[in-house]
Amino acid sequence: MLIDAYGKTFAGDSCSEKTVPEGTVLGQTADEILEMVSCYASDGRVFYKKGDLVNAAASFAYGYGWLDAGRFLGYLAGSPSAPPKIDDHLPDSLFEHLSEKTYRYQRMLTSALEGVSPSPDSETVMYAAACSIEEKARSYLDGGAAHLPDDLINALVQFSYGYGWLDCGVRAGLFSISGDRHLFTI
């Protein structure tokens, strides 16, 4: 899939409906998730229009991570998906930017995973949900690493998508942060 098509698909999907009641704590959390999804969809389009394909792809993937985590948790309608393989060939002029961002997101997601632990009691469904989100983020960290060093754009998409899942889980209150709080949008 091309980055532009990925962004257009994400823009359409980002209009997901809430499945929880307005005016409740769950409704407020759903609103926060949708706000993040909307911001990353918008940011990605701005980056794309400016020719910054690296940040566009990262924004779309990160936002999709938020969207799919929100769907997984039941705040939003729809089913989680998986990031597509990006087929765009980025210009050589973006290689340094792509390389720096990809390896930085790998380090950030690694640190983020090391700096959180599930908050809910281990006998609850929410604990299982936190563990699933943590597992999802780890699987995309590993998936991104499998693309290195030859396919940086797809590594970045994997890292960004997994990071979006984890960040959404933190925002939804499923994790305690023992590491760097600046790694999360709280």
Image (tube, rainbow, N blue to C red):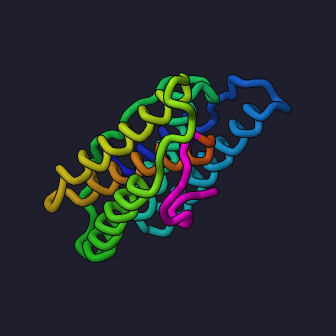
Q: Quadrant of the N terminus?
A: top left
Picture coordinates of residue 6, whole percent (x, y): 42, 44
Q: Residue at x 43, y 68 (%)?
A: 51
Asked if one can make out residue 53 in the rendered structure from this viewpoint, the answer is no
Counting from the top left corner in percent of width and height, residue 69 is at: 51, 36
Residue at image x 69%, y 45%?
A: 32
Asked if residue 151 can be seen in this view, the reply is yes
Span colored in magenta: 174-186
Quarter of the image for residue 96 reads bottom left
Residue 131 appears left or right of 41? left
Report whether 87 appears left or right of 74: left
Query: Quadrant where the C terminus lies?
Result: bottom right
Establish if 30 lies above or below 181: above
Query: Which residue is outermost to the left?
Result: 150
Q: Where residue 36 sits in the image (x, y, percent)?
A: 62, 49
Which residue of the protein is positioned furthest toward the right in this rendering? 23
Q: Nearer the viewer, residue 147 or 178?
A: 178
Is residue 179 one of those drawn in magenta?
A: yes
- Left or right, residue 5 beside residue 70: left
Does the magenta run of residues contain 148? no
Residue at left offset 34%, top offset 58%: 110
